[in-house]
Image (spheres, rainbow, N blue to C red):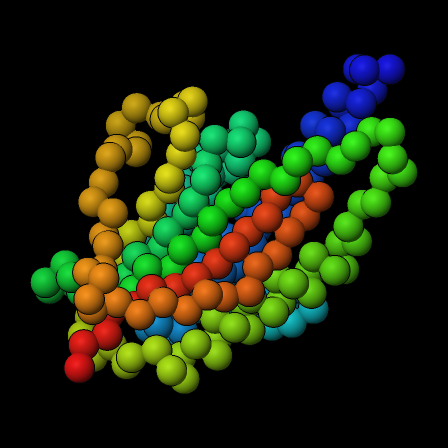
Amino acid sequence: MSAKQANRQAITLKGSTTLVTEFFRYAVNTILFQREVYPSDDFHMVKKYGQTVLVTQNLALENYLKRILDQVEKWLLTGSVTQLVLAIISKDTRTPLERWVFDIKLLPPQDESKPSTAKPEAEIQSEIRAILKQIISMVTYLPVIHEPTVFNILAYTNDSAEVPAGEWNDADPLSIEASKSQQVKMRNFSTDVHRIEAMVAYRYEE
């Protein structure tokens, strides 16, 4: 009996991990497009979550994101990643301009003695659509960036995380000074296993 329960939980974790990793892919692409980190010609439209989303067709960027998200997916499966940050920085001065933060929380397992109440995938997709639409709407009130930018993705893990040698290292958190930072809490979404809470901090100077 216990073996069957463990197997069911593993499938649930794997399914949730796939959904969360996929969300990160589309969220990162949406941010890079909306904040004009890459030219609009580098993106093409695809249908996802019942709406049109933009994804890169820049092969170098696509391969870079795949390499990062493949590792994030492994950390999600082991419960060892707690936060993902997309930092947009000035290409010339390396000053952090924006930090898009996604907190990753593991939900407590459901009580086996109670009837299972799996969250419908349609509800999860609706929550994801709302976050992506919110990212798009952010453009209307985030400060306009008048300089070339680059980005970096930071993954925060716990001490038990297995880190591939030579691929990841301790990095500058690319924080924005508190006196020059504004924050906007964004929507969140959850599966039966994970909860993703989003916010953006941006540089704001009078």
Image coordinates for residue 84, horizontal then vertical, percent: 41, 47
Seen in the picture, residue 33 relative to 25 is either above or below; the reply is: below
Which image quarter: residue 114?
A: top right
Seen in the picture, residue 35 relative to 195 is either above or below; the reply is: below
Image coordinates for residue 203, horizontal then vertical, percent: 24, 69
Question: Which of the two residues, 99 or 125, is positioned nearer the viewer here?
Answer: 99
Image coordinates for residue 171, horizontal then vertical, percent: 23, 40
Seen in the picture, residue 32 relative to 117 is either above or below; the reply is: below
- Residue 136 visible at all: yes
Q: Residue furthest left?
A: 93
Image coordinates for residue 35, horizontal then vertical, percent: 35, 72
Which image quarter: residue 151?
A: bottom left
Query: What residue is shown at x 20% (from left), y 69% (from top)?
Result: 180
Query: What residue is shown at x 43% (from left), y 22% (from top)?
Result: 160
Question: Which of the two residues, 71 or 205, is positioned nearer the viewer here?
Answer: 205
Task: Please state if 33 lies on the left or on the right of 54 as rendered.
Answer: left
- Residue 63 visible at all: no
Image quarter in which the C terminus is found: bottom left
Query: What residue is shown at x 36% (from left), y 55% (from top)?
Result: 86
Query: What residue is shown at x 87% (from left), y 15% (from top)?
Result: 1
Q: Residue furthest bottom?
A: 140
